[in-house]
Every structure is written in C-alpha cells, then in structure tokens.
Amino acid sequence: MSFEGVNEDRFCVIINDHKHALTDYAFCSDISTSCEEKTRKFEIIGTTIHERKNLVRIKVDGGIYNGYHPIIRCDYLFQFEDKFSCFVELKGTDINHAVEQLKSSLKHITTKGKRYAYIVARNISPRKSTQKDKLVLMFSNKQFKASFDMKNNQMEKSINKLK
C-alpha cells in the first residue's frame, strides 16, 4: 500500500504503551474517507484533496490486532494528522458489545487530538435514545475523553465539524 504525498511521520498510534508509525501497518491502513460492512457505512464527508491525503483509515479488528487477540476492539480507526481520531464500530444489533469494543479500543489505542467513538448498527430503535444519552456521558468522561454518537445503517460526519 502506498502513502504517496503523505508525511507518514505524522501518523502514529500508541498501542499498549508502545508507539507505532502507521507505516508499520501499511498492510491494514490506507487513505480513505469511508468504511462499510454489509449494509452499514461510516463516511467522513466534505474533505478536500489535501485533507484526503492526510486522513488515514486503519483496520483495527483483523488489522492492527490480527488473528486471535484477547483484547476486544472496534472495526476501524480514522486518524487525521494530530487533529482528531474516529473509532468506528459497524455492528449488527448487539449495541452492548459494540460499546465494549469501543471502550477497549479507546483504552488500548492512544491517539492525538480530539477523539470520537461511533457505532453504526443495523437496528437502533427510538427507545435507545435514553441509552444513547447515557453513553454520550460515559464516553466523555476522563477515562475515554471521546464524543459519542450512534445511528442506524449509515453515518456521515463532516470533516469541518470533526477538526
């Protein structure tokens, strides 16, 4: 995989207290603004060509953590320079497990800038809004320091609002 035109030194993650340049994970990272699985999709919209060159999508489950690993983890991580990172879980219906995957990923992967945690699930009912409010508070605490959101099937976030 090529990172042509990208200053790769700016893209680092810390996994279990060890710093790794994303070039160490070229097999599981690329420059992309979206990820999808079955009917669920997450996308960062409104990006310029320059911003796309500086936005890296990392496959966490099956990528950084490949094969059997005792740590549960989210599906994807988007890192934009040192400005923000988005931890994304694309899920069927088990919201509780998705929450645990995001919590574990936020705990074990240290990134720079603002942090966001997102769940895109197949069936989030309107009655889950109370649960969503509780999750927004939980993810914003000192341990995770992340903004949280969840939606049915498709989520789009504007890069200008994430910065």
Image (cartoon, rainbow, N blue to C red):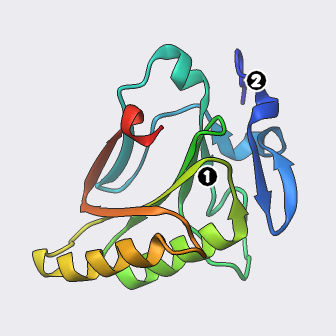
- The single residue placed furthest to the front in the displayed view is 142
What amino acid is found at the position of numbered circle 2 in the picture?
Asn
For discs 2 and 1, the disc positioned in front in the rendered view:
2
Disc 2 element? loop
Q: Position of residue 45 (x, y in %)?
A: 35, 32
| Residue at the spot 70% in from the left edge and 15% down from the top edge | 5
What amino acid is found at the position of numbered circle 1 in the picture?
Lys
> Label 1 crowding class (10 Å Cα cut-off): few <14, some 14-19, many 20+?
many
Q: Position of residue 117 (x, y in %)?
A: 46, 62
Quarter of the rendering containing residue 91:
bottom left
Q: Is residue 78 above or below residue 100?
A: above
Q: Is residue 162 above or below residue 125?
A: above
Q: Position of residue 71 (x, y in %)?
A: 69, 79
Residue 22 in sight here: yes
- The single residue placed furthest to the right in the displayed view is 18
| Residue at the spot 13% in from the left edge and 81% down from the top edge | 127
Mark 2 and mark 1: Cα distance apart in space: 20 Å
Instruction: Report which residue position mark 1 lands on.
Output: 59
Quadrant that contains the N terminus: top right
- Dot placed on the residue nearer the N-terminal end, 2 or 1: 2
Q: Position of residue 139 (x, y in %)?
A: 47, 72
